[in-house]
């Protein structure tokens, strides 16, 4: 079966952004993230005739992804995240602040509820407004606010992230490095 | 899109941090897979529904067979017998997939890649099934060489674990154009590196093999991406164009051709799409 060029192009353009978002949603698990994006894009493909003419096909794809994620959470998500991989890799992260804090981020995410992760991703990673976030998740703006507040309150207590949030953060390490 | 509206300083810091902290994806998805597989998930997630369905069918057949058999002969005895023969096959298959979902492969020893070029290190790590995540730091080591890695070599880790590599970006800050010049006075070399700048003769730390693996630079800042590609021996062209989606901040690379992971001869032009 051949891939129509516009779908091919869509996947090439969007998949890395979607993967990064899915990485956040799944608490830093590339395997699950890949599964998730693949499912979402499969869904997009199924409705491609309709999606391709939309104003913002990528918004549809992201929405599908978040919904799929929230639907899956009861099934396999929670159980699988607690795999043996996370603890060991922190072993020798000595002086790398970015690496350290990424590891903290993964742990922090794993400690958040799925809906909180979804809010964090949509609101702070993709910079969507509260209203957009609520629309995508199918909940009220109030819920978005409270979930975000709860999530941040939690992140504040995670060792590597506390400094980031209070502003005594590692300087813009990403740019300098 | 630029975000920040209605966010507290704390929220803004979180937003900025997330964009830096989320690593670039280690894989590239191919559209063919999506189409062949249709809307369903990958193989792993087929297992559970398939087994469940099989179990349901098995129970149905068992109950049906027993029930018809008994109703033909002596109806009163039907239900206890059906319970027994239907009950046990249902339990066995549905218990299995839970265990097999966890089996993500055995542990492998992390290789030592310190001293290799980024491309070499990446290939070594990927071949073993780990996921390299490269960042850069200025150092006296030749640009493009891996100076530190984490976790340390020898650690036994599961496939798919991220291995963080710190590569040297050259000796001093701000010298993206001249990675070779160790003590070079290229102090004001902040010249933003125009796309087609033919500085291709500068790559030092690159193995002289014919083909080099194209590194992933998606998610990096433009300058860093150019530096890394040059260090790996490629020529860089830049297109300033934003993707249709909202999730890329200005100055960030969001697409590259050829795709990373592919092998290309040194000097090949790698085209980057940088968000504006």
Image (tube, rainbow, N blue to C red):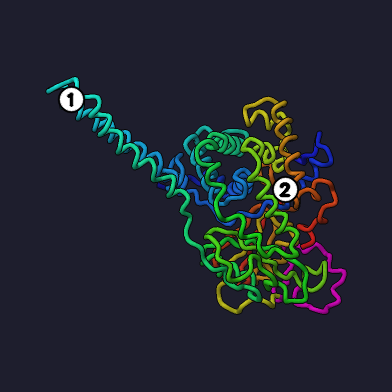
Relative horizontal placement of residue B214, taking residue B104 as reference (left or right):
right
Q: Residues within 10 Å of mark 1 (few under 14, many from 20)?
A: some
Q: Does the magenta stretch include residue B5?
A: no
User: Residue B80, can we see it?
Assistant: yes
Residue A154, x across and y down, in percent: 73, 41
Could you tell me how far apart the alpha carbons at marks 2 and 1 are, in whole angstroms? 62 Å
Q: Is mark 1 on a helix, strand or loop?
A: helix
Quadrant of the rendered image containing residue B231: bottom right
Name above or below for residue B46 compared with residue A129.
below
Q: Earlier in the sequence, mark 2 or mark 1?
A: 2
Q: Name the residue under label 2.
A: B18
Which region is colored magenta? B178-202
Q: Quadrant of the C terminus of chain A?
A: bottom right
Give the residue furthest to the left: B73
Q: Residue B68 shows which numbered tag?
A: 1
Residue B166, x across and y down, in percent: 70, 67
Relative horizontal placement of residue A69, taking residue B34 as reference (left or right):
right
For the residue pair A137 and A1, the one nearer the viewer reads as A137
């Amino acid at each position: 079966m051949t891939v129509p060029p516009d779908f091919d192009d869509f996947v090439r353009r969007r998949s890395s952004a979607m993967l990064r978002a899915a990485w956040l949603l799944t608490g830093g698990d590339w395997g699950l993230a890949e599964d998730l994006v693949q499912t979402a894009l499969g869904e997009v493909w199924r409705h491609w005739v309709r999606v391709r003419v939309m104003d913002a096909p990528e918004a549809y794809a992201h929405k599908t992804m978040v919904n799929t994620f929230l639907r899956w959470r009861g099934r396999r998500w929670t159980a699988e995240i607690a795999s043996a991989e996370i603890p060991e890799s922190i072993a020798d992260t000595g002086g790398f602040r970015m690496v350290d804090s990424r590891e903290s981020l993964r742990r922090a995410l794993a400690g958040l509820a799925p809906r909180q992760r979804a809010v964090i991703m949509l609101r702070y990673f993709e910079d969507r407004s509260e209203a957009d976030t609520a629309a995508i998740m199918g909940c009220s703006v109030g819920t978005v606010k409270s979930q975000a507040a709860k999530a941040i309150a939690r992140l504040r207590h995670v060792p590597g992230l506390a400094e980031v949030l209070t502003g005594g953060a590692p300087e813009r390490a990403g740019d300098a490095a | 899109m630029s975000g920040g509206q209605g966010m507290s300083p704390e929220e803004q810091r979180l937003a900025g941090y997330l964009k830096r902290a989320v690593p670039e994806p280690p894989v590239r998805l191919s559209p063919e897979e999506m189409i062949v597989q249709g809307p369903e998930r990958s193989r792993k997630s087929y297992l559970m529904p398939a087994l469940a369905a099989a179990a349901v069918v098995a129970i149905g057949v068992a109950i049906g067979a027993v029930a018809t058999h008994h109703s033909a002969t002596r109806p009163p005895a039907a239900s206890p017998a059906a319970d027994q023969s239907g009950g046990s096959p249902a339990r066995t298959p549905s218990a299995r997939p839970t265990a097999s979902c966890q089996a993500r492969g055995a542990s492998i020893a992390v290789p030592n890649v310190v001293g290799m070029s980024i491309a070499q290190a990446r290939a070594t790590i990927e071949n073993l099934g780990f996921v390299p995540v490269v960042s850069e730091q200025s150092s006296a080591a030749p640009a493009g060489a891996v100076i530190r890695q984490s976790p340390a070599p020898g650690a036994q880790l599961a496939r798919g674990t991220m291995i963080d590599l710190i590569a040297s970006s050259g000796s001093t800050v701000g010298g993206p154009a001249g990675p070779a010049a160790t003590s070079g006075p290229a102090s004001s070399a902040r010249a933003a590196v125009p796309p087609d700048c033919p500085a291709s003769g500068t790559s030092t730390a690159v193995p002289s093999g014919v083909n080099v693996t194209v590194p992933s630079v998606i998610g990096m800042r433009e300058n860093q991406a150019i530096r890394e590609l040059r260090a790996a021996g490629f020529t860089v062209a830049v297109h300033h164009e934003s993707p249709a989606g909202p999730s890329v901040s200005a100055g960030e690379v969001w697409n590259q051709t050829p795709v990373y992971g592919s092998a290309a001869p040194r000097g090949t032009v790698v085209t980057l799409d940088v968000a504006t």
